[in-house]
Image (cartoon, grey):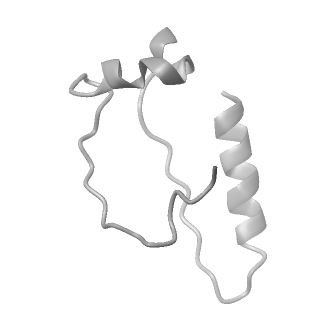
Amino acid sequence: KSLICSGAVLANRLTEMEDWTVLLLEAGGDETEISDVPVLAAYLQLSKLDWKYKTEPQGTACLGQ
């Protein structure tokens, strides 16, 4: 629930950029308890919570340690 609020706050801040257009989408139902435990993320794959999105590789993504 806090993610919904923070997403809305972020979207609002992004609208302060005059030449940007922002679309905020909310989707999905209630999360399971498994989604709160990062080490259990593999159990969410191939479940109804896995939307099976594909992404393009990005050289500047996921560089945080």
Q: Nearer the viewer, residue 25 or 46?
A: 46
**Residue at (72%, 57%) from the top-left corner?**
10
Where is 31 relative to 58, above or below?
above
The image quarter in which residue 50 lies: top left
Where is 56 relative to 26, above or below?
below
Whether residue 30 is visible, yes or no, is: no
Which quadrant of the rendered structure holds the N terminus? Answer: top right
| Image side of residue 37 versus residue 16, left or right | left
| Image side of residue 60 versus residue 1, left or right | left
| Image side of residue 16 versus residue 55, left or right | right
Where does the image place residue 65, in percent across and percent down from the top left?
64, 49
The image quarter in which residue 17 lies: bottom right
The image quarter in which residue 14 lies: bottom right
Where does the image place residue 22, in percent across and percent down from the top left?
59, 70
Whether residue 12 is visible, yes or no, is: yes
**Residue at (32%, 18%) from the top-left corner?**
43
Farthest-out residue, bottom: 19
Where is 34 relative to 15, above or below?
above
**Residue at (78%, 76%) from the top-left corner?**
16
